[in-house]
Image (cartoon, coloured by chain):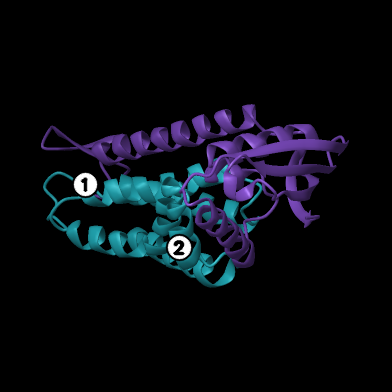
Amino acid sequence: MLRAAVLLVALATSAAATFGSGIDPWDLAPWLARHGGLGLALALGWLVLAPVPLAVAALARRRTPWPWVAVVTIHLAVPVVLLARFPHLLPGWAWAVVGLSVLLGLASVATAFPAPGARPGS
Amino acid sequence: MPRRVNGVDTGLVGKGGPMTNKIGLIVAGAVAAVLLLAGGVTALVVSGGDPTSVQDVADAAVDAAEDLDVDDGIALLCEAPSKQDRADLEALIAAAQDEADTKDPDVDYEISNVKGEEKGSFDVKITSDEKAFEDDEIAVTVLVDSQDGRSCISGYDDRS
C-alpha cells in the first residue's frame, strides 16, 4: 500500500514535471548536460523517470527490501537537494509534494523489512 | 514495546501484526538522516552565497559566465530558463564557437552602470581578443528583481 502510494506520487511528479512545469525536461536535461550541468541534468532526468526504477525495486522487494531502500533514498534525496539548491525556481506546490514524498518514502522503508518469521513479500 | 513470542524478542513494534520491525525503523532513520544532511548541507552552502543586491548578481553572473558554470548561472535566474531562452543562448554560443573556430573562445565581461540596491539593473559589455571578434561587441542591460530577499535576474535588453 505504501509502496503504491510512493509510486503514485512519483508518477504525478513525473507528469507534472513533463507537462505542467513549462520547462520541457526532455529538452532541458540534454541542454544542461551539453553545457556542463550534468548533475542537474541527471537530477531532472530522475524526476521524470523515477517511476521506472521504483516499480522495478517494488517488484524485487519480494526477494530483498534493499533495492527499494536504495531507490527510495535516491528518489527522496534528489528533490530535497533540488529544493535546497533552487528554492526560488520551483513552484510552491513542489514543497508540499516533496514533504508528502518524504513521509510516504520513509514509512515505506520502515515497513519494507519483513518481521522475523514472516513470509517474504507478505 | 517489542513483542515476545515464547520468551524471544521478535523485534516487532506495536501491538498489532507484523507491520514493521526494528531493522526497518533503523534503516528509515538512517535514510532520514541522509536527507537531512544532503538538504542541510546544500542549503547552508547556497544560503552563504545568496546574492542580495544588484552588484552581487552582477559579480556572480560574471563568475558563472567565465567559469561556464550552468548550475550557478541558473541559480541566478528568477525563473527556470524557457525553451526560447535556451535556444537563444545555444545559438549565441554556437555562433561564437564557429566564428572563433574554438570550443572555448576567449571572452571578457565588463560590468558598468549598476543601478539599484536589491532590484535594478546593470550593463554588461562582452568583448573578445579573438581575431574573429576584434570589431564585435555585445552590450546587454540585465534586469534584476528581488524575491524573498534574494536578488535574481528577471530579464535582459540587448543593446548591441
Where disc 2 sits, the SS reads: helix
Residue B144 percent coordinates (x, y): 79, 45
Image height check: is A7 above or below A82? Answer: below
Marker count (numbered): 2
The residue shown at (60%, 58%) is B92
Q: Is residue B20 visible?
A: yes
Residue A107 percent coordinates (x, y): 38, 49
- Label 1 in the same subunit as label 2: yes
The residue shown at (30%, 51%) is A71
Residue B69 falls left or right of residue B128: left
Under mark 1, the amino acid is Trp
Residue B50 or B144: which is nearer the viewer? B144
Where disc 1 sits, the SS reads: helix
Disc 1: host chain: A
Disc 2: host chain: A
Q: Is residue B57 visible?
A: no
Residue B16 or A92: which is nearer the viewer? A92
Colour chosen for chain B: purple
Task: Sort mark 2 into few (<14), some (14-19) or many (20+) by Cα contacts within 10 Å.
Answer: some
Residue A96 or B107: which is nearer the viewer? B107
Image height check: is A7 above or below B120? Answer: below
Q: Which mark is residue A66?
A: 1
Under mark 2, the amino acid is Val
Residue B11 percent coordinates (x, y): 22, 36
Task: Sort mark 1 into few (<14), some (14-19) or many (20+) by Cα contacts within 10 Å.
Answer: some
Q: Please give the letter of the chain rendered in cyan.
A: A
